[in-house]
Image (cartoon, rainbow, N blue to C red):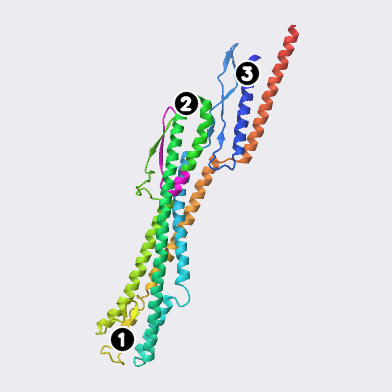
Amino acid sequence: MIQGLYTSLSGLRSSRLAIEVIGDNIANVNTDGYQKREYRAKENYSIIKNSNNIGTGVSSYPIKRSHNEIMFSKMKNSLSLLSEDKAYKDGINFLNKLVLENIDKKNDINSLINNMYNSIEEISKNPNNKSIHEIFKSNLKLILDRADYLDKTLDKTLDKMISNIDLSINSKRDEINQNLKEFDLLTEKISIYESANDMNIKNRYMNDLRDRRDLIEERLSELSSFRVQKTKYSNGRINITDTGNRIYSRSSYETSGEIKGLKDLKDTIIDLKNTFNKDFSKFKRNINNIYIKYGNENLIIDNKVTDNELFFSKENNLGDNTIALDLLKLRDKNSFDMNFKNIIFSENTKINSNYLYTESLFNIYKENNDSVSKVNIDTETINLINYQRAYEANAKVIKTINEILKTTINLKN
């Protein structure tokens, strides 16, 4: 009978501890980084009494977090890729807006170039009409003025973007270093507590420290290609091995995350600057080369149309449309703003498509990870009711045994 009291008392303690764990889970349902705690009970060894196996109740395993390292790692990796795409996407979308505001408006360069070639086509049909020559010259001036303005505006805007990107990258590297220091400190504390023999100390501190460390891991994964190797030993200790997460002055490990996205954006901006400058220079050089080919001077000098009389013939005489016909051959390959726009539009389409894919992938892995680690109020409520009933039942058993013992004692008296 006395053994029954101890057995029921163990059930009472077990149910009470389970209710405390459930209460902690519910209280932290909206806490960032909190991973739900699991209460697990185990049957105590039976004892032999009068040739019968008599149960001795229940005890509990250490309270652990509901955590799956494989799911967590997949979620972190997909978060790193998503952060990389988002940083790049935001920058490309800004560049796309810049193009729409500064290039694709009324009298944009492409339209002006078309007008210029239309006037050249008219000259090729009627080379003696000097008024059309002046229209060509006027269109060319508008193109050069517009291109020169865009060249300076884009250079200024893109240089500012590059400067801001560099500042942002350095700031994020500083954040990485700060987080790594805290990560190392937490790992050291975890290692100390894992070596402790006192289960109360382990239960009290270990799970909270791991929650905080995992939260830092998530942020580091957002910033860069942070990876850790976790090796669990037989004594329960976990060794954290650096696998390229130390950024500091070494940027070779920045293969994903926000920093990688910003570095790719910077490279794209530099390519855009070079493309516009190169194509603009090519546009002017192609026109000048045709004039020089027939013994004339450069038509364009320092982004300005010269005041020299314009001739559209081999012998500098009106009536021969040879030069005009040669200029018309440049029509399909001398629209220098198109390469610039095509790069941006192509990158914009590609990154937005990539982002949708990485976002859906991240959502899948996050949902899988959350299904294991996050608190579900409905599940906790059901568990609470079950353990409450178990607690009440164990209390009733104790009360019943107590009454039986009283009765037995009274009978003896």
User: What kind of residue is marked 1?
Assistant: Asn
In this picture, residue 120 sits left or right of residue 314: right
* Labels 1 and 3 touching (C-beta < 8 A): no
The number of numbered badges drawn on the structure is 3
How crowded pointer 3 is (Cα within 10 Å; few <14, some 14-19, many 20+) is rated as some
User: In the image, what residue occupies the spot 35% across and 67% down?
Assistant: 275
In this picture, residue 292 sits left or right of residue 173: left
Q: Which residues are magenta?
A: 217-235
User: What kind of residue is marked 3?
Assistant: Tyr
Q: In which quadrant of the rendered image does the N terminus lie?
A: top right
**Real-space Cα separation, disc 3 to disc 2, in angstroms:** 29 Å
Q: Earlier in the sequence, mark 2 or mark 1?
A: 2
Q: Which residue is mark 3?
A: 6
Q: Which residue is mark 2?
A: 196
Element class at badge 2: loop
Q: Nearer the viewer, mark 1 or mark 3?
A: 1
Q: Which residue is mark 1?
A: 308
Q: Earlier in the sequence, mark 3 or mark 2?
A: 3
